[in-house]
Amino acid sequence: MTTGIGTNGRPTATGSGNGGPVGYSLPLSPTGESAMLTPPPWHFSGEVVMVEYRVDPDAARRFLPPGLEPGADPGAAAAVFATWQWCSQDGAELAEPGRCQFGEFLILLGCEFEGRPMARCPYAWVDQAVPMMRGWVQGMPKQFGVIHQSRPVTVGRAGSRLAPGGRFDGALSVHGRRVVEATVTVERQTDRRPVLHDVPLAHTLMFPEWVPTAAGPRARLVASEVGDVEFSPIWTGSGDLAFFDGPGGDFETLTPLEVGNGHVFSYGETLHGGRLLDDYSRANDSSDDNGGASAEDPLHS
């Protein structure tokens, strides 16, 4: 691997070799400026509409890879709608609103890694290409979808305010079909952060092999290094959540058995990169010295 600084002042990288086009990601180019992804850190500020619910614990368990356990609350789940604005360390993307904004929907399942509470994201959809590719780099299973979400207003009557009785909705459509609808009617502020939005996320980092090898694709259990976490005051109340036919039978096993509270809040974080939790191939690869995360290493949310 060779690294350097492109003409945009950002680090670039490419495979071992003697010069040639560079970039943090494809597409490579002479200066690295054409790369689809910038290197982390990445900063995110978002508006969140979230509904907690319960799923069949056996169904949730089947979505957990080796190394993750259901934890103390099997069947705990959440449906999360978010509208994000993001930028790299230099903030250059903020000058292009069409580039730095996107919508997202994801499902979270409660789990544990070595006794530490975490969450697993079995499904996620976004409406822009860059966050989808960035998700794959993290091991997050992002796909294309159409996400709509109502936001709080501070003036006028074309929306709800963050006050008792305010209603906030989210909707996901995939391939032209409505898949998820959520509604939160807020009642009060709370100091309690939503549990599944306040724990580390565990992902499976894996890419299909374009050039086959005897070992096959190499899967690794990873988590993200997150800092500068901020929550606005959290409004909570009743939640409604409905799943519809669409993405397939596996997705439908995660439909709600019981719907809990809903939450509306603003959220910010900085994503610095990833850390290894478990390298599944290490038992068959004596040359791998990285192993899993040590017991004393903290996991960021």
Image (spheres, rainbow, N blue to C red):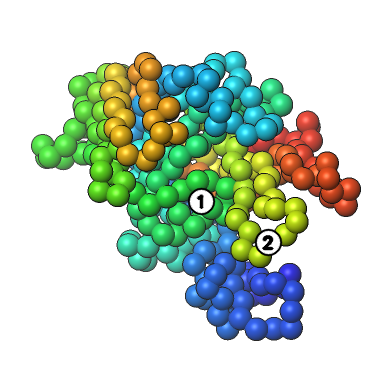
From the image, tell me which residue sits under label 1: 135
User: Is residue 189 at all visible to an observer of this figure?
Assistant: no
Q: In this view, does 5 lie to the left or right of 148?
A: right
Above or below, comparing residue 61 to residue 83 in the picture: above
Residue 277 image offset from top left, x and y in percent: 71, 39
Which residue ends up furthest to the left in the rendered image? Answer: 157
Q: Which of pointers 1 and 2 lies earlier in the amino acid sequence?
A: 1
Residue 41 image offset from top left, x and y in percent: 57, 55
Above or below, comparing residue 234 to residue 43 in the picture: above
Location of the C terminus by quadrant is top right
Residue 147 image offset from top left, x and y in percent: 30, 45
Q: Could you say which quadrant of the image residue 104 lies in?
A: top left
Query: At x 66% / y 41%, what residue is drawn?
Result: 221
- Kind of residue sitting beneath label 2: Pro
Q: Distance between the residues labelled 1 and 2?
A: 24 Å
From the image, tell me which residue sits under label 2: 212
Residue 7 image offset from top left, x and y in percent: 56, 80
Element class at badge 2: loop
Q: Could you say which quadrant of the image residue 5 lies in?
A: bottom right
- Kind of residue sitting beneath label 1: Gly
Query: At x 40% / y 46%, what residue is drawn?
Result: 125
Above or below, comparing residue 201 to residue 239 in the picture: below
Instruction: Judge the density around disc 2: few (<14), some (14-19), many (≥20) Cα neighbours within 10 Å.
Output: few
